[in-house]
Image (cartoon, rainbow, N blue to C red):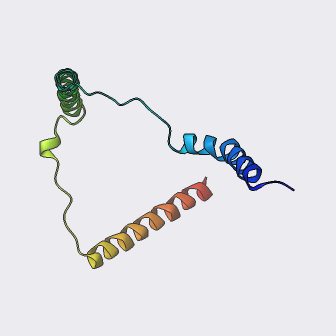
Amino acid sequence: MKTTEQIVKEAKESYEKHFKDAQEKANPKSDDVVLDKDKLTEEVKEMEIVEEKKHDSLELLREQVVREAEESFQKIFKNAHEAQPTPRMSVNEMYDALNKEKERISHMVEELKEKQMSK
């Protein structure tokens, strides 16, 4: 039979073997990070300058795109200011206009069929 001391010794060895690694993994020892306020302030200022340059270049790019879009619009739609806006209609007016357009198209189809048949 084992003595109490032997049992306690084996238990400690087993504990160290199985659970000590788990504790180290759960609580990894790391060196404390020393923060220098001056260095951080300098880094933040440098990052701010870089971001401001990016913002300025994007702003210039946006202005260029807007200018090119306006030029393209003027080339394509020279007389855009002369175009009449689409009149506002109620749902019933739109439905009536749709039915009239359907009738007009069906008459055109019938006329085309008659022309095809007469040839």
Name the quadrant containing residue 81: top left
- Identify the residue shown where x is 66% and y is 43%: 16
In screen coordinates, is 101 left or right of 78? right
Q: Nearer the viewer, residue 59 or 87?
A: 59
- Identify the residue shown where x is 50% and y is 38%: 28
Relative height, residue 44 to residue 6 (above, below): above
Name the quadrant containing residue 41: top left
Q: Which of 34 and 46 is in front in this view?
A: 34
Percent x, y of residue 8: 71, 52
Q: Which residue lies furthest to the right in this view?
A: 1
Percent x, y of residue 24: 56, 40
Q: Which of 50 and 68 is in front in this view?
A: 50
Relative height, residue 9 to residue 113 (above, below): above
Q: Nearer the viewer, residue 107 or 44?
A: 44
- Identify the residue shown where x is 56% and y is 61%: 114
Quarter of the N terminus within the rendering: bottom right
Percent x, y of residue 33: 33, 29
In screen coordinates, is 20 left or right of 40? right
Percent x, y of residue 75: 22, 29
Q: Which residue lies furthest to the left in this view?
A: 81
